[in-house]
Image (spheres, helix red, strand yellow):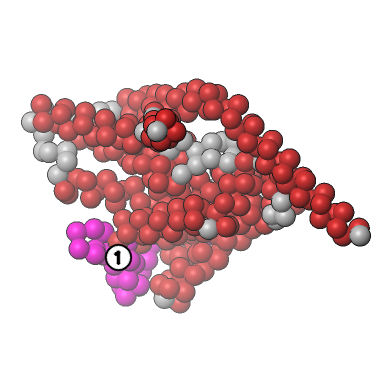
Amino acid sequence: MSGTGGTLRRKFGLREAGVYYALLLLVAVLTAVTALLGRPSYLSAVNVVNILYQTAPVAIMGVAMTVVLITGNFDLSVASVAALAAAVNIMVIGQVGFWLAMAASLGVAAVVGVLNGVIVELVGINAFIVTLGTLTAVRGLVLVVTGGRSLMVSTPRALRVMTYFESGRAGPFPLPILYMAGFTLGVGLALHFTAAGRRVYAVGGNAEAARLAGINVRAYKLGAFVLCSLAAGFAGVLYASRFGAMNPTALSGEELTVIAAAILGGTSLFGGAGSVLKTVAGALVLYTLTNGFNILNLGANYQGLIEGTVLIAAAAIYTVGGRRRAPRRVAAALAAGSSAAGAHEAKSRAAAR
């Protein structure tokens, strides 16, 4: 019983479920404040659907970013990749149609992901430095391909398909909400219920032990970069479809929102831990804040102050909780490493015979 009680306390504790508590508390406070001020109900179906709709592109990128962080890496280039994918989509859609344009956008995004992964894993440069470089280089490439000018879709048929793809509805929900839900569900199930998913966690938790256990560490880390860039490319297509146009500075700084969502969801910046569902909850916290600020007519200065405070508070909670659990994680990692090393040594002896 004590073991069950300890498991429940851990699952519903501040570290494991803190982002859900924060989201519920934030919604409760905003609902009460809007009611006191005589504003329209914060929890109206229209407003809730609007928050989910606005959150979807960042949440999709955040889910993929979580996979990269779990493997122990970092990707600052996601927003620039999304902008490049949007530019490619708008530039070619009139000639090749929507689906081929989306394929071209995703292909360009995948190339950037492969480039990031190869430089980090094969050349050995730190992921922060590499993706900071590709962030700048890809943003420059966007300026080159657009000529520094805003782009617009001029083909009515292409514009209609784009509008449906991004603004069409399935019942009460805009399609981007379903894209977000489907992607989150797929990645979450893959991480927790497949051998590949367990290997992703193993790679981030103890790369050397994973290597000794026969896991291709480089392949999994490189794959995470490609997944992240593909998700960014898809978000870029959503952005292009939402407006039917883009300017070269579109999505600037959005990579910080994506990373903030993952951090709010408790994803470790050191690898080996993270939940895609919590990342989506983290993104919802950020967009619930923004939505509440707009309803309450709070200035942008206050928005930045409050969002920054929330992010620091979340990081502090997870850091303190992580210190308490560190001895157990170290012991588990040492045990895994010892077991993997023993298995590797046994295989070597058998091969020698």
Specify the quadrant of the image occupied by residue 111: bottom right
Q: Quadrant of the N terminus?
A: top left
Say if residue 279 shows up in the picture: yes
Specify the quadrant of the image occupied by residue 299: top left
Would you place residue 309 above or below residue 130 in this image?
Answer: above
Residue at figure coordinates x 62%, y 41% from the top left: 205
Q: Secondary structure at mark 1?
A: helix
Seen as rendered, the residue at the extreme front is 1
Residue at figure coordinates x 22%, y 46% from the top left: 48
Specify the quadrant of the image occupied by residue 182: bottom left
Q: Pick whichever, 330 or 167, lies toward us.
A: 330
Q: Is residue 169 magenta?
A: yes
Q: Pick whichever, 11 or 280, lies toward us.
A: 11
- Relative image position of residue 2 (x, y in whole percent): 42, 30
Would you place residue 9 above or below residue 228 in this image?
Answer: above
Residue at figure coordinates x 27%, y 45% from the top left: 51
Say if residue 236 shows up in the picture: no
Residue at figure coordinates x 43%, y 59% from the top left: 186
Would you place residue 164 above or below residue 254 in this image?
Answer: below
Q: Pick whichever, 91 or 133, lies toward us.
A: 133
Q: Which residues are magenta?
A: 145-174
Seen as rendered, the residue at the extreme left is 38
Would you place residue 120 above or below residue 239 in this image?
Answer: above
Q: Residues within 10 Å of mark 1 (few under 14, many from 20)?
A: some
Position of residue 339 in the picture relative to residue 51 (left or right): right
- Relative image position of residue 256 (x, y in whole percent): 48, 38
Q: Pick whichever, 160 or 76, lies toward us.
A: 76
Q: Quadrant of the C terminus?
A: bottom right
Q: Amino acid at mark 1?
A: Thr
Q: Is residue 300 magenta?
A: no
- Relative image position of residue 279 (x, y in whole percent): 42, 43
Say which residue label 1 marks: 163
